[in-house]
Amino acid sequence: MNEPVIVSASDFCEKTADYAKELVELLTLRKENLVLAESCTAGLAADCIAGIPGASAVLWGSFVSYTADAKAKMLGIPLELIEKHGAVSIPVAIAMAEAALMESSASWSCSVSGLAGPGGDGSDKPVGSLCIAIACKNSGNLSSESFSYLVREGNMVPQRNEIRLAAAALIFEHILKKIMQNEK
């Protein structure tokens, strides 16, 4: 995994609701929809979207696959992939996003896996580590992008819910950018 980009929790926590509103508006305008595959956010991103009027037209749903077993059973992620790279990894985030897209009728998919703390997962990844992936179908072909982050507040590890809110905001920021890049 490449070195993660370090981001400030407070910079993103404040943007979560605005990004969710902008995402609902953009998807509505484009007549497209979104499916999520959430691990560390445990449905928080879907909840943020669902709180926006009109969300039912654009939110296909969310796979809350919190454990390795859930990722395997709900999304078909091979346990070997998780064992090889760890649940918080770019390969697993990509597999989650692609599987969610294939299991849904959504236009777009976004996944997140991370360590919200306060404890780690026994790996060398620090609390605040996030792996995000976006997948879409372009002319019938599946394409995906991925991003790696480390959420901090100064030199400190933020609180669990701050990491989760920052993760949701980062999901929304990336999916908004990707959709705008693919303007029809």
Image: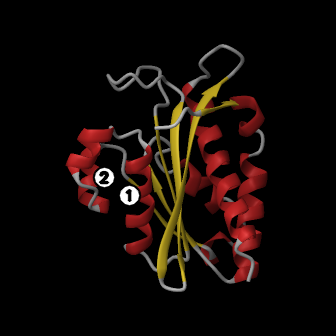
Q: Residues within 10 Å of mark 1 (few under 14, many from 20)?
A: many
Of all residues shown, which one is farthest toward the front?
A: 2
Q: CA distance from mark 2 to mark 1?
A: 10 Å
Q: Which residue is mark 1?
A: 95
Q: Residues within 10 Å of mark 2 (few under 14, many from 20)?
A: many
Colour mapping: secondary structure
Q: Position of residue 135 (x, y in %)?
A: 52, 65
Q: Amino acid at mark 1?
A: Ala
Q: Amino acid at mark 2?
A: Lys
Q: Which sits in the foreground, 84 or 9? A: 84
Of all residues shown, which one is farthest toward the top?
A: 155
| Quarter of the figure with the C terminus | bottom right
Q: Quadrant of residue 75?
A: bottom left
Q: Is residue 177 left or right of residue 142?
A: right
SS under mark 1: helix
Instruction: Specify whether residue 52 is in view.
Output: no
Query: Closer to the N terminus: mark 2 or mark 1?
Result: 2
In this rendering, the count of numbered labels is 2
* Residue drawn at 46 percent across, 38 percent down: 1
Q: Which residue is mark 2?
A: 71
Q: Is residue 59 left or right of residue 64?
A: right
Q: Position of residue 79 (x, y in %)?
A: 21, 48
* Residue drawn at 28 percent across, 44 percent down: 82
Instruction: Specify whether residue 64 is in view.
Output: yes
Q: Position of residue 104 (x, y in %)?
A: 42, 75
Considering only vertical position in the picture, is 38 above or below 62? above
* Residue drawn at 61 percent across, 29 percent down: 151
Q: Which mark is residue 22?
A: none
